[in-house]
Image (spheres, rainbow, N blue to C red):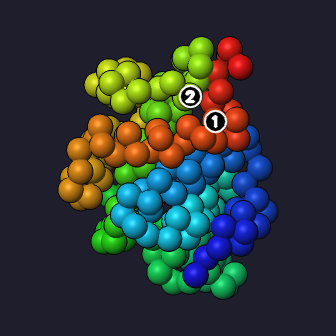
Amino acid sequence: MLTLERARELNDSQVKEYHLVIHARNVMYAMGAMADYFGEDREHWMAVGYLHDYDYEKYPEEHLLHTEKELLAEGVDAADVRAILSHGWGICTDVKPETNMEKSLFTVDELTGIIQACARMRPQGITDLEVKSFMKKFKDKKFAAKCDRDLIIKGCEMLGMEVPEVARICIEGMKPHAADIDLLGTEH
């Protein structure tokens, strides 16, 4: 099973761009919160979340095409590699999310982008972000327009959950790590 230490080692060897590192952390913390919700192994889910964009910096136009072979060769468990591949379902892979971990990763990858954008606009960053404020921005298709809302909705449906519920879990999971994800806001 993939450990957080090993995920950091692997990802940090490939991912150097600041915004991609922050994104990996956002997804990592959101995945930890989702693991808690489902009663699963928090560190394991965080590790998979942190490693999910392993090949993106080097191969943005071929995202996830340079992941499976490379991670398997590094000793990453096939189930964890499958979970990572599944977050690109319908975009750049045909690996459909089946497990709660896979469905969560598929969903929070995009969802954390909108959470981050919301938090960046607030004086207190993510520390006082509420679901109600998030949902206003979520409904505004011009806000964080590159984040695929239909994909988030599809992911939530696969999880059998509503968008506000998943957003709440992710926001609360990210709040304690506001400094690490550069979302403390301007008043701290």
Q: Residue 71, percent across and down?
A: 63, 77
- Helix, strand or loop at label 2? It is loop
Which part of the image, by quadrant, shows the N terminus?
bottom right
Which residue is at a point 63% across and 30% down the rendered structure image?
Answer: 183
Number of marks present in the image shown: 2
Q: Amino acid at mark 2?
A: Thr
Marks 1 and 2 close (CB-CB < 8 Å): yes
Describe residue 172's horizontal placement relative to residue 26 as left or right: left
User: Visible in this render: residue 81?
Assistant: yes
Q: Residues within 10 Å of mark 2 (few under 14, many from 20)?
A: many
Q: Quadrant of residue 106?
A: bottom left
Which numbered tag is attached to residue 127?
Answer: 2
Secondary structure of residue under mark 1: loop
Observer-nearest residue: 75 or 133? 133
The residue to which callout 1 is attached is 178
In the rendered view, does 20 fall on the left or right side of 45?
Answer: right
Report which quarter residue 98 is drawn in: bottom left
Crowd rating for badge 1 (residues with CA inside 10 Å; few <14, some 14–19, many 20+): some
Task: Please give the label number shown on residue 107.
Answer: none
Above-or-below relation of 116 to 78: above
Q: Is residue 184 above or below residue 80?
A: above
Q: Where in the figure is residue 52, as x and y percent of width and height?
A: 56, 61
Does residue 62 appear in this view?
A: no
CA gap between label 1 and label 2 equals 7 Å
Horizontal arrangement in the rendering, residue 71 relative to residue 130 (left or right)? right
Give x and y (percent) for residue 3. 65, 73
**Residue at image coords 38%, 39%:** 168
The kind of residue tagged 1 is: Ala
Residue at image position (41%, 27%) is 130
For the C terminus, the quadrant is top right
Which of pointers 1 and 2 lies earlier in the amino acid sequence? 2
> Residue 66, how many percent across, how many down?
60, 69
